[in-house]
Image (cartoon, rainbow, N blue to C red):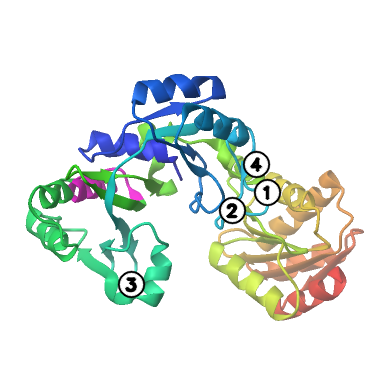
Amino acid sequence: MHIHEYQAKGLFRQFNIKTPNSILINTTAEAGKACADLGGNIWVVKAQVHAGGRGKGGGVVLCRSIEEVEDTCKQLFNTRLITPQTDAKGLPINQLLIEGGQNIERELYLGLLIDRQTQQITILASTEGGMDIETVASETPEKIIKFGVNPLGALNVDDCTLIASQLKLEGVLSEQFVSALMGLYEIFTSKDVSLIEINPLITTTENSLLALDGKIDFDDNALYRHEDILALRDILQEDEKENEASEYQLNYISLDGTIGCMVNGAGLAMATMDLIEHHGGSPANFLDVGGGTTAERVAKAFELIQTEKNVAGILVNIFGGIVRCDLIAEGILQAIEKVGLNLPIVVRLEGTNAAAGLKLLDESSAEIYTEANLTQAAIKIVELSK
């Protein structure tokens, strides 16, 4: 689950990580008062959307007068921001963060993530803040500082001080960095975070260290333990179909291809999509219906797939381990009748009672093509969709 910058900064402050003074507004009418309350003569208007690269998309604007702030707010409110990390539709701008300008001396990068290869919580830091960390890593990897922390252990002050020295932070700035990094680590471990980053983490001419931006992603599987975090969810920033799918315990992601996919198991779904691509097709969605598939969930899956405007055919790929393939076949037939599908459908069943399931589909009046072999099923749906 993603949260907004202003929410991330709220968490930062709870854990003694300093941030610039800022005020969240919901309408342009609030902009003037926000600037007056913040003081100064330079402000930054920031669109609050769940995507990085906001500056590149025009969602972060430096303003030198209240009139300029108000004009910027008028231009941004109730529009959609397109960034390198969004699709062509972009994300809706419903809130703006007005932040006081800062006297920036240096821009650093600081982040924590789970490195599955080393099975550690990994701290990433760099003197090249404000840039895409991926670009820094590929073009100047020597400027990336990596420090792994055993999840059964803990981060200590000496570790943080070492990283501060590698970033050439001394004295009071080093002390502030140690406090900030310890705070980030506490957020990461106590709130079941999967990614947290500050880019940039700035030093100012006033000798202060501030989180100028903030991004936090949480592990969805652990949200049941964190009602306070779940309360931060903004469903308006999420895909409507994905939200609808989640109500039926379906994992659904829209793509831009022409072949709808319904599969049980995330790994099998990825393999199915790869196979479609390999044989000249393009998947219209990722859809994992899970292990405990029911007729109702199958019907909802077909309904969601059919709403994709580019879909020209559907491939169903079910491996019956926990569930029986004959029950899946019955669910598919019920779903087709309920939803009224008029697209070519190829069904591949394998596992428990697969033969019985395929026989049931073959003997039905529905226009369904069955295959026992996944490769043949992929080739068939690619042909039919063209």
As drawn, the residue found furthest toward the right would be 365
Residue 136 on the magenta span: no
One can see residue 1 in this view? no
Q: How far apart are labels 4 and 3 at the CA level?
A: 33 Å
Tell me the kind of residue under disc 2: Thr
- Split into 4 quadrants, where in the image is the C terminus? bottom right
Q: Which mark is residue 86?
A: 2
Q: How far apart are labels 2 and 4 at the CA level?
A: 15 Å
Magenta portion: prevailing SS class: helix
In front of the other: 192 or 213: 213
Instruction: Tell me which segment is drawn in magenta.
Output: 180-193
State which tag comes first along the sequence, 3 or 1.
1
Q: How far apart are labels 4 and 1 at the CA level?
A: 13 Å
One can see residue 143 in this view? yes
Q: Are marks 2 and 1 in contact (CB under 8 Å)?
A: yes
State which tag comes first along the sequence, 3 or 2.
2
SS state under label 4: helix
Mark 4 or 1: in front is 1
Tell me the kind of residue under disc 4: Glu
Tell me the kind of residue under disc 3: Gln
State which tag comes first along the sequence, 4 or 3.
3
Mark 3 or 2: in front is 2
Residue indicated by mark 4: 240
* Residue 26 percent coordinates (x, y): 52, 25
Q: Which mark is residue 118?
A: none
* Residue 226 percent coordinates (x, y): 35, 36
Residue 208 position by quadrant: top left
